[in-house]
Amino acid sequence: MRPIYRNTIAFVFVILSALSVYHTLNLQFTFSLEQFFPQGDEDLEFYLKFEKDFGADVNFLLVALEREEGVFEQSFLQKTKDFTLEALRLPHVNESQSLATMERPIKTPFAITTVPLIHINDPSKYEKDKAMIMADDRFVNNLITADGSTLVVGIKTKGALDIDQSNEFISALKTSLEKYEFEDYHLLGSAYFQKEMVDMQKREVVVTSIISGLLVTIVMFWVFRRFWGMTIALVSIAMGLLLFFGFIGATGRPLNAMAALYPLLMIIVGTSDVIHIMSKYIDELRKGNNKTDAIKVTIKEIGLATLLTSITTAIGFLTLMTSKVTPIKEFGLNAAIGVGIAYLTVIFFTTACISFFTTDKLIRFGKTQESWDKLMTAANNFTKNYHSKIIIGAVLMAIICGIGIMNIGTNYRIESNLPIGKKITEDFLFFEDKLTGFRPMDIAVFAQGEYMADDIAVLKEIDKVEKHLREYDAIQSITSITDVYKGINQMYSNNNPKAYHLPEEESKFKKYKKLTQKVAKSATETMLSKNEKMARISTRLKDVGADNIKLVEDDINAWIAKNTDSNIVTFKPTGTGLILDKNANYIRRNLIQGLGIAVFIISLLMALLFRNWRMVLISLIPNIFPLLLAGAMLGYLGIDLDAGVSIIFAIVFGIAVDDTIHFLSKFKLSLNKGMSIEDSLQITFMETGKAICLTSLVLFFGFMVLLTSIHPPSVTIGLLISLTLVSAVVSDLLLIPVMVRLLMKDDKT
């Protein structure tokens, strides 16, 4: 490479790096539950229309305030009341209430008035207030725990908050809580999730970048043992990562829940390309070629193979574009772009840099090289002498994997995606254990014919459904427009708890309806549509898993169809929780569809590259085994397949094919030079086998870095990909030679 070219290339990359630093500092992070909605789903379209009538079901934040000795203590109750009222003045808040601020209506001879649920200023009434509250299902497990040790403050926010608004709101909320010095508190809500998950993303990006960088530094020192060889490799990898984040920042693409994987993928892909390029350049110099000729041969042979591996890896990631889940689609596209950036960095910047140096400046040889030569020769001989046993082992492994794959579950739970050891997870589990949980589920109610949603006939049908819902342990916090009429009926019965039911006489109902329209209109706004033809039953579910909730939903639908009058009213479950749970069905479908597309496209590429159907078959079969192993491990380890974990297969397939291409490309080049199959296999093992093992070693420990993650899906991804990529290199070095000898005995082309 001429000096003017390499100097120009180096200058261009320095400028691009400087620009990337600026844009990297302006990276944006985002997280919201809405991102995980399956786009284009008919139930999602229904929910979005439903949301316009009734508002979002996740625009709330619950604050659980603990007092271990019990909440009925004057000082604690007063602080809770003051905090509840102060919360109304927090940024982006619409409503705030708790038992300390709520009142109950009473009927007097003169008018309807209200009295506090808890007479804070009169401790002598606490026992009576407590008895009334603890006997009311509307309050227990919703606004107070069953053991009476925690009060809940319910805060409603002004619509969906973005990350800046969530940060502002949560910061102000925590400042207010600290002022009152509560014994302990727990938070639950979408704004809290958003803030904490974005903070986790930032932490993950930094930590994985640092640990991966240290790992690669150790590997490069071990491989090259020379300052310039190690420095060029590390600078090339770091530059690829920097250019990638610079591109993301410059294009205004916010990083989502998959952000922690980007630095790892860029470092791993860059490391693989660097090792193959530099290993080939060093091999050419050792053969006696000058630096110019060595670079030409390296770019011609390894540059083409690396281009193909980059294309196949990118295709693996692009298959994720078939997903209906936005973060998965964005991850697939961004990762594919990252692979391209890593390739361009190595093929231009790395080759420009190494062309300045001779072998002794880049690497130090010793007994290590002799050991590698002996190991690769032994591996080749093993495939020659034990080909039958290798085939039998592969068949048995496929059968074992098939059994494991049959046990893959999709019982997605929110808890499995929360950061390990963080307060948000502790808070979530507190609400799951002692209160109503987080998962919202609404049931849309449609009045039929001439009926209105608040007619007595419709309300009675709603009441039947509510009573049935209370039979499910997973369903909590059931509210609907019937609560308004039940509450009025109770008020007219001297607040007797036994009178909390719908009025039985038509005359009473008409009286209550008029009263509702006069004094309780605001109470019905979130439960009744403006045209009064639709109502809602609002519930929250325990985090029992997507599959279990689907069974509950199906059972509810079956019961409704059998036990309600569809001429009066119809029902349809909806809500963010159910929409998110539908991802399980799409994940299965998209996984098979995406991998099918990837296999087809890569088969075409192999056919164009090798122009031999046998070589296409040889290139694909070894790469099926890592996929089988990944699926089997999910089944045997009881790991549920969710949106985050599903990307494992695209990563495994995209990266596993790389080693196959490098191996077969070198094999084909040797055949084209007139060598026999056995000689071609031997030289392929000697020249390419080492690079494949080294890159696989980097891949293994690189993805093991994710075991340091606090994000459970990332830990799962790291563990499974590390182990399956080991199987990929074993599959390549054992199966490919065996299949070559079986299928190409008399084929010299």
Image (cartoon, helix red, strand yellow):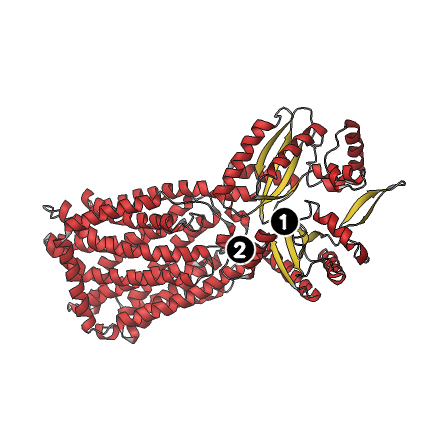
Q: Position of residue 133 (x, y in %)?
A: 72, 49
Q: Nearer the viewer, residue 418 or 220?
A: 418
Question: What residue is shown with label 1?
Answer: 59
**In this rendering, position of residue 392 left or right of residue 574:** left
Crowding at label 1, few (<14), some or many (≥20) Cα neighbours within 10 Å?
A: some
Q: Residue visible at 32% across and 48% down?
A: 627
Residue 538 drawn above or below residue 644? above
User: Tag 1's secondary structure?
Assistant: loop
Amino acid type indicated by mark 1: Asn
Q: Residue visible at 40% across and 54% down?
A: 335
Q: Which of 507 and 48 is in front in this view?
A: 507
Crowding at label 2, few (<14), some or many (≥20) Cα neighbours within 10 Å?
A: many
Q: Position of residue 609 (x, y in %)?
A: 23, 48
Q: Where is residue 611 in the image (x, y as percent from the top left)?
A: 20, 44
Numbered circle sitting on residue 155: none
Q: Nearer the viewer, residue 306 or 620?
A: 620
User: Tag 2's secondary structure?
Assistant: loop
Q: Which of 107 and 244 is in front in this view?
A: 107
Question: What residue is shown with label 2?
Answer: 30
Q: Earlier in the sequence, mark 1 or mark 2?
A: 2
